[in-house]
Amino acid sequence: MKVLFWRSLVVLFVILGFIGAILPGMPTTVFLILAAWASSKGWPQMDAWLLNHPKYGPTLRDWRAHGTVPRKAKWLASIMMLISGIIMLFTTAPLAVKAFTDITMLIVAIWLWRRPEPNPVIIQQNAVDLEKTDMPAAQSAESQLNPEKSNKAELKKVESENNKS
């Protein structure tokens, strides 16, 4: 039941991210970050697919490892929120709804610009490290975030091989 919950969230977030890739004004990366988070809880294959995606994988790995957001993404998100906020002002929505959405987008923009940006040296170093190892990027990112978990998995593997012989 728990796995079904996480997988349902992953599907929902991936669908929203796909819609965001098509519709201007709706974010893509935010929903893919949420999808990667949910997939790490209950769908390892999807987590690996997202982290190894040619277009979004590097951004997702940087977010997971360092909480960084590229400057281009910050600008794009801020401009889209500004345009959405201006459009919202001209709708027939109640004033409270207009104020709430515009204030929420302002708070999100402030939070977004306070996030660090990826360091090109670290990105290049991570790419070189991945090339040197036979580990897939998702496994490498997971081991960077949680080395104890990675070491425990390796120990269990060695123990099970020793028990077989």
Image: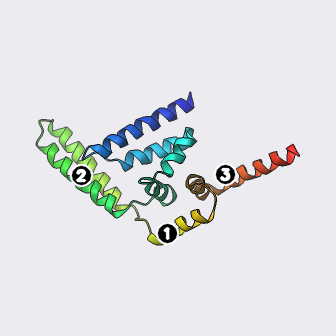
Q: SS for tag 1?
A: helix
What residue did someone put label 2 on? 80
> Counting residues from the N terminus, which is met first, the one under dot 3 or under dot 1?
1
Q: CA distance from mark 1 to mark 2?
A: 29 Å
Which numbered mark, 1 or 2, is in the foreground of this view?
Answer: 1
Expressed as whole percent of the image width and height from the top left, the position of residue 148 reads: 67, 55
**What's under tag 2, amino acid-wise?**
Met
Residue at 41%, 39% in the rendered image: 13
Q: Quadrant of residue 77?
A: bottom left
What residue did someone put label 1 on? 124
Quadrant of the snapshot with the N terminus: top right
Q: Badge 3, how many Cα within 10 Å: few under 14, some, many 20+?
A: few
Q: CA distance from mark 2 to mark 3?
A: 39 Å
Q: Which mark is residue 7?
A: none
The foreground one among 31 and 95 is 31
What residue did someone put label 3 on? 149
Question: Quick check: 22 above or below 109?
Answer: above
